[in-house]
Image (cartoon, rainbow, N blue to C red):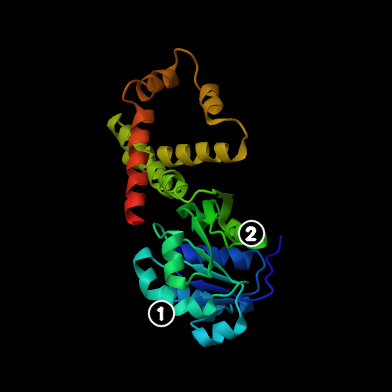
């Protein structure tokens, strides 16, 4: 499906996630002439890409307001929100949708900074968006229309899968699972490589085996409809080597309770950051 907008899209912040979204939109057919990026200090690489693609960079707010953008996507760091958002108030309109991907910034806080009439979607993407395999979960305030929600889904889907929750506090749980989750998987690969070295493998080979195994298993999860438990059982022969390892991983104090504690800690920290 080709991305098409009747009015401009404003991207505020051209960092890694903002850049990933921009690349996804342009690859999806969105006209660069319809995109306006605001970033006071983009990296040289980002500025080169933006200008080379024909995207507008750092147009004045008055100019943007006159163009009546249909979407303003906020991809700045949470600690910059108080500084950046009040300047965007002229862009607030009944038919303008604000999408924030800033971790820990609540819908209530966004409304305080933008104004009571702002239609806002809060979204939590994750870093695999940079390779088009992201997972984003969003929630919306009561002013967002069904059409605006569909538009948000279409824009966020440019970098991966999209789902919605109706209760904003669930975003903290989402943050703990998919938002922070890639780091857990990367750490698993680290630990698997280290375990290979401990068993006598050369470091380079151990790392290669760990990377290929984690990414290959992830691709099976992506391509196949089988439940993770089914895939696990399919490669576990009774009394075999995999079963011996799983007896440790699934035993008392094993991986499942450890991940429950870890994700609870991430959720709790997400709540703290949102206060």
How many C-alpha atoms fall within 10 Å of the one at disc 2: few (<14), some, or many (≥20)? some
Residue 26 found in image quarter: bottom right
Residue positioned most to the top: 239
User: In the image, residue 271 lies at what x, y percent?
Assistant: 36, 50
Q: Which residue is mark 1?
A: 40
Residue 43 visible from this viewpoint: no
Q: Residues within 10 Å of mark 1 (few under 14, many from 20)?
A: few
Residue 45, can we see it?
yes
Residue on which the image places disc 2: 154
Q: Which residue: 44% across, 65% down? A: 110
Residue for point 41% across, 57% down:
103
Whether residue 92 sits left or right of residue 109 in the image: it is right
Quadrant of the rendered image containing residue 8: bottom right
The answer to whether 221 is drawn above or below residue 75 in the figure is: above
Q: Considering the image in quadrants, where does the C terminus appear?
A: bottom left
Query: Which of the numbered marks, if any, corresponds to residue 219?
Result: none
Figure check: 64 above or below 113: below
x, y percent for residue 6: 69, 74
Residue that appears at 51% across and 76% down? 37
Query: Relative to the observer, which residue lies in front, 243 or 36?
Result: 36
Q: How far apart, in angstroms, are the residues tagged by discs 2 and 1?
A: 27 Å
Q: Quadrant of the N terminus?
A: bottom right
User: Which is nearer the eye, 61 or 233?
Assistant: 61
Under circle 2, the secondary element is helix
Residue 256 locus on image (x, y percent): 39, 29
In what element is the residue under mark 1?
loop
Figure check: 63 above or below 262 = below
Farthest left residue in view: 198
Q: Residue at x 42, y 48 (%)?
A: 172
């Amino acid at each position: 499906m080709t991305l098409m907008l009747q009015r401009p899209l404003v991207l505020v912040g051209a960092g890694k996630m903002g850049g990933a979204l921009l690349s996804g939109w342009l690859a999806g057919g969105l006209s660069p002439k319809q995109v306006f990026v605001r970033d006071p200090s983009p990296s040289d690489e980002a500025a080169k890409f933006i200008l080379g693609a024909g995207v507008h960079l750092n147009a004045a707010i008055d100019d943007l307001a006159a163009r009546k953008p249909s979407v303003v996507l906020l991809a700045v760091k949470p600690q910059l929100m108080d500084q950046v958002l009040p300047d965007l108030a002229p862009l607030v309109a009944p038919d303008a949708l604000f999408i924030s991907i800033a971790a820990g910034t609540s819908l209530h806080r966004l409304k305080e900074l933008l104004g009571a009439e702002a239609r806002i979607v809060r979204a939590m993407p994750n870093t695999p968006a940079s390779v088009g395999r992201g997972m984003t979960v969003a929630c919306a305030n009561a002013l967002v229309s069904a059409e605006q929600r569909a538009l948000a889904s279409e824009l966020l889907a440019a970098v991966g899968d999209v789902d919605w929750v109706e209760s904003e506090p669930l975003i903290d749980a989402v943050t703990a699972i998919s938002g922070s989750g890639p780091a857990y998987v990367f750490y698993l690969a680290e630990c698997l490589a280290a375990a290979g070295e401990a068993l006598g493998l050369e470091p380079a080979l151990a790392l290669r085996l760990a990377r290929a195994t984690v990414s290959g298993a992830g691709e099976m999860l992506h391509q196949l409809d089988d439940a993770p438990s089914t895939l696990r059982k399919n490669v576990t022969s009774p009394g075999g080597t995999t079963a011996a390892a799983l007896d440790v991983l699934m035993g008392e104090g094993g991986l499942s309770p450890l991940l429950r504690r870890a994700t609870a800690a991430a959720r709790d920290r997400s709540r703290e950051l949102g206060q």
